[in-house]
């Protein structure tokens, strides 16, 4: 009798126990079905993901101070070596204005030879009437930096840089003699400078700055007006301040 009562109670408990719903498997979602993102149509493949374009180093509103060195190349007579200072004001991330002053010394550009019946190295003072012996360069530049980029170095470090163009008037002081028999005299000449360069960011305050510049100025050789050109490379360590 007790056994029969126990079996009846077990059967009643099973009837009262609610049935658990069966779990339905989640539907698979493909990459093409993800919602669109800004800058790209869909997550179709890793190549279609938008690139990371955030600018880490900002220079808008800052001043830039750069002790600089300069050396000219391809000179027919005199090679210029100069040291100076540039101060630049950055209005935003792209546009800036700068002023610079560079004092220099001149060396004979090699190879130079003086030829008459035979060719020999120039004696002292034989080239005093040739152009390109610059003492001082000063000017104002307006710069535009349209490119900000990043370069991964062996996957260990990311190098940030920006590239810029600058253009402005230049005032130069040149040592030149009216003729080969006269002493050298200093003269001022107006010209212009065009530069193409870049900044390599070390920190948010310090950059290495490199540029190639073309200087064009009004020369006067033995009484005749000429247009003189000088190609140079410049560089230095610059410091940002003012914020």
Image (spheres, rainbow, N blue to C red):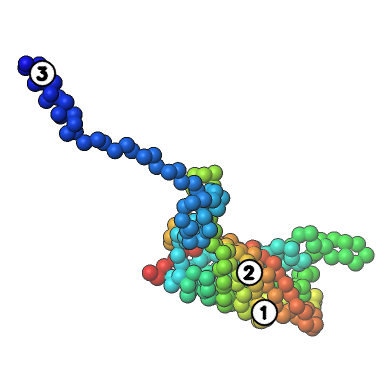
Q: Does 91 sit above or below residue 45?
A: below
Residue 232: image tag:
none
Furthest-left residue in this view: 2
Residue name at image x 70 percent, y 62 percent: 73
Q: Is residue 81 visible?
A: no
Residue 4: image tag:
3
Residue name at image x 56 percent, y 68 percent: 145
Q: Is residue 75 visible?
A: yes
Q: Residue tagged by mark 1?
A: 191
Q: Earlier in the sequence, mark 2 or mark 3?
A: 3
Q: Dot 2, how many residues are within 10 Å of its Cα: few (below 14), some (14-19), or many (20+)?
A: many
Depth check, front residue: 223 or 68: 68
Q: Dot 3, how many residues are within 10 Å of its Cα: few (below 14), some (14-19), or many (20+)?
A: few
Depth check, front residue: 137 or 4: 4
- Find out whether the residues at labels 3 and 1 contact each other: C-beta distance under 8 Å: no
Q: Is residue 222 left or right of residue 151?
A: right
Residue name at image x 50 percent, y 48 percent: 31
- Find out whether the residues at labels 2 and 3 contact each other: C-beta distance under 8 Å: no
Provide the secondary structure element on which disc 1 rests.
strand
Q: Quadrant of the N terminus?
A: top left
Q: Is residue 12 left or right of residue 208?
A: left
Residue 221 picture location, percent across and down: 78, 78
């Amino acid at each position: 009798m007790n056994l029969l009562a126990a079996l009846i109670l077990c059967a009643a408990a099973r009837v009262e126990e609610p049935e658990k719903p069966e779990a339905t498997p989640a539907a698979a979602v493909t990459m093409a079905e993800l919602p669109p993102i800004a800058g790209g149509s869909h997550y179709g493949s890793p190549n279609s993901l938008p690139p990371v374009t955030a600018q880490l180093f900002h220079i808008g509103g800052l001043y830039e101070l750069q002790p600089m060195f300069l050396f000219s190349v391809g000179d027919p007579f005199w090679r210029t070596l100069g040291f100076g200072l540039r101060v630049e004001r950055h209005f935003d991330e792209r546009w800036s204005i700068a002023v610079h002053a560079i004092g220099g010394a001149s060396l004979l550009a090699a190879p130079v030879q003086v030829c008459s019946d035979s060719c020999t190295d120039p004696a002292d003072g034989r080239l005093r009437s040739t152009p390109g012996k610059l003492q001082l360069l000063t000017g104002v530049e307006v710069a535009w930096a349209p490119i900000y980029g990043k370069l991964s170095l062996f996957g260990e470090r990311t190098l940030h840089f920006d590239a810029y163009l600058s253009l402005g008037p230049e005032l130069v002081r040149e040592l030149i003699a009216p003729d080969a028999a006269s002493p050298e005299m200093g003269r001022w000449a107006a010209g212009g400078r065009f530069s193409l360069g870049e900044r390599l960011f070390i920190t948010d305050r310090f950059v290495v700055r490199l540029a190639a510049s073309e200087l064009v100025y009004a020369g006067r050789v033995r009484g005749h007006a000429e247009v003189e050109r000088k190609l140079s490379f410049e560089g230095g360590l610059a410091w940002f301040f003012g914020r």
